[in-house]
Image (cartoon, grey):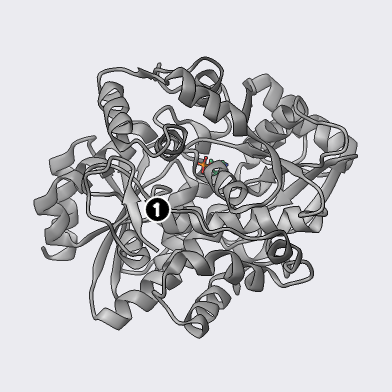
Amino acid sequence: MKYISTRGNAPVLSFEEAMLTGLARDGGLYLPETIPQMSAADIAALEGQSYEEAAFRVMWPYLGGAFTEDEFRAIIARAYDGFAHAARAPLVQLAPGHFLLELFHGPTLAFKDFAMQLIGQLFEASLKRSGRRVCIVGATSGDTGSAAIEAFRGLDAVDVFILYPHGRVSEVQRRQMTTPSEANVHALAIDGHFDDAQARVKDMFNDFAFRDAVHLAGVNSINWARVLAQVVYYFTSAVSLGAPHRSVSFTVPTGNFGDIFAGYIAKRMGLPIDRLVVATNRNDILHRCLGTGAYRPAGVAPTISPSMDIEVSSNFERALFCAYGQDSGAVAQLMDELKAGGFNVSQGALEALQESFDSGSATEDETRATIARTRQETGELICPHTAVGVKVAGEHLAPGTPMITLATAHAAKFPDAVEQASGTRPPLPKHMADLYERSERVTRVANDLAAIEDIIRDRTGN
Ligand SMILES: *Cc1c(COP(=O)(O)O)cnc(C)c1O
């Protein structure tokens, strides 16, 4: 199994190399050259299996022998051991034909734990074997950073630096990043938006001297191994609702397009997915682009679903690469145009995108109203990101095809917004009850590449 860059100008890599590298050296994102197929019989055989066994069967063809079967099973077992629910990703019914896939039973209460816990174990197994050490740098709008820190804290061969936008993450998210006391964990609060943090991380990857000196590795949602981990729960949830014998649709609260792109990969592998619905908050560039083909960032507005306050949606590049028939030259040109303000997707590529994806968006008022209504009608307290999904899913229900909306975070991660909307304050689960008493450790930095690189060189002794 070989991995190629969306921009066509970087070395072809193995799974392990692509995982350790993150962003390709030409600025592109790695993708498998071909998508492995699962037959209807393979999919049907997932029924009744544990989450871990399904994860093994779905992901194994992508590894290209990077680990033995036994090693990979052990990695998966360790990754999901700390989840608070035996099913890992349980489904609950919200209304006739509408289901919630609860992805918040991991250690940081958001779906990013599914990918990050796995990647932590994959990195550790790989680095131990080679005796190497890496420096992980990531940008976060809140949930990625806490998930990364939780997955890498205390590991021997890894330093982890997380950039988050100062004052723009929830208190629970911030405390999850600033309270771990392990010496290999470094939280950096940058003066800027998430897009600034993400841009500085991309800059560091493009500064090859720095990149090589500190052995930079990326675990943002651009990392293929993260997308791959997320493919699994599309299979397990669809199978529990009758796939491959019937189709299902998914609605996915979307920011960086990583989670929904995993759904697209599941569909390409053979899972009968009817519609993949992109749900955005009022930062709706993806919704606008899927409607008109025009992708032109207009500035990020803060919302109560901050993990989706994104206008430069990095994984969308992978979807474009597929929509353009793997034409890396066309993708590289679009990304150049984006630097100059934006681009227009060609008619053919737009039609290809619209074949798989629908979209919708929710205003702040609609998001709050959905939290309140869901509480009244079902007793469930949902987080604001999930509420964006539930609102948009409601516009795409089709008789006979179950809709699964991804519940991307626990309501307790966003207690103020949820209480304001529903009148009920969601309590933190027991294992986190003392989060507000732990002491914090964070370094404030300017939105300046050199300043950030200096801190990282200094702390890693490079
Ligand atoms: C990251 C995140 C999203 C968006 O996921 P993408 O893969 O970036 O599209 C949605 N909801 C929550 C709670 C998140 O943490």
Q: Going by the image, does 104 lie left or right of 160?
A: right
Q: Where in the figure is residue 387, as x and y percent of width and height?
A: 69, 34
Side of 96 relative to 220 (left or right): right
Residue 80, image x and y in percent? 59, 70
Whether ligand 1 has any atom under 8 Å from the Cβ at mark 1 is answered as: no
Q: Is residue 455 above or below residue 196?
A: below
The relative height of residue 345 versus residue 383 in the rendered view (above or below) is above
Q: How many marks?
A: 1
Q: Residue at x 81, y 53 (%)?
A: 245
Q: 311 or 56: which is nearer to us?
A: 56
Q: Position of residue 315 (x, y in %)?
A: 43, 40
Position of the N terminus, as image quadrant, is bottom left
Disc 1 marks which residue?
33
Q: Local crowd at mark 1 within 10 Å, few (<14), some, or many (≥20)?
A: few
User: At x 38% / y 35%, what residue is drawn?
Assistant: 194
Q: Is residue 435 in view?
A: no
- Point out the residue furthest to the bottom here: 70
The location of residue 306, given as percent across then percent down, is 52, 35
The quadrant where ligand 1 appears is top right
Q: Is residue 348 above or below residue 216?
A: above
Q: Amino acid at mark 1?
A: Glu
Instruction: Answer with left or right where residue 171 lies relative to residue 386.
Output: left
